Image (cartoon, rainbow, N blue to C red):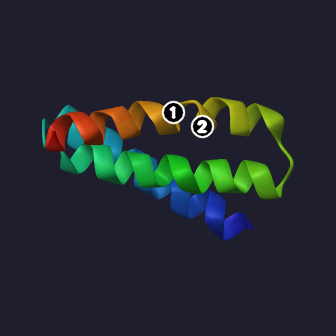
Amino acid sequence: MNNLKWLGTFFVLIGILLTNINIYPLNIFFHGFGVVLWTAFGFLGKDKAIMTNFGFQIPIFAFGITNYFF
């Protein structure tokens, strides 16, 4: 489960980097995938704070992806 957390961290940081160097929409996919991994980690670890933080980001990224394609 520790690997899930670190993999999520890697993708979130790559997404943040891509945002800062203005590489869109790739930033949304990387960051969004990291958020999903962190949410899964929170669910498996029964950590409500992590699930709240990252879980509420999922619809935001879904909106960004939808907005890009439609």
Q: Quadrant of the N terminus?
A: bottom right
The picture places residue 49, in percent across and down from the top left corner, at: 77, 31
**Three-letter residue code for mark 2:** Phe
* Residue topped by disc 2: 54
Name the element at disc 1: helix
59 lies above or below 2: above
Residue 15's spot in the image, x, y percent?
Answer: 33, 45
Q: Residue at x 57, y 57 (%)?
A: 37
Of residues 26 and 14, the one drawn nearer to the viewer in this rendering: 26
Q: Is residue 39 above or below residue 7?
A: above
The structure residue drawn at horizontal position 22% and vertical position 44%, both measured from the top left corner, is: 18
Q: Is residue 36 left or right of residue 52?
A: left
Res 14 seen here: no
Q: Residues within 10 Å of mark 1 (few under 14, many from 20)?
A: some
Specify the amino acid type for callout 1.
Gln
Quarter assignment of residue 16: top left
Q: Position of residue 5 (x, y in %)?
A: 64, 58
Task: Residue lying at the far right in this picture: please name it.
Answer: 46
Q: Residue under circle 1?
A: 57
- Specify whether residue 18 is in view: yes
Left or right of 34 on screen, residue 6? right
Instruction: Report if the CB atoms under discs 2 and 1 are less than 8 Å apart.
Output: yes
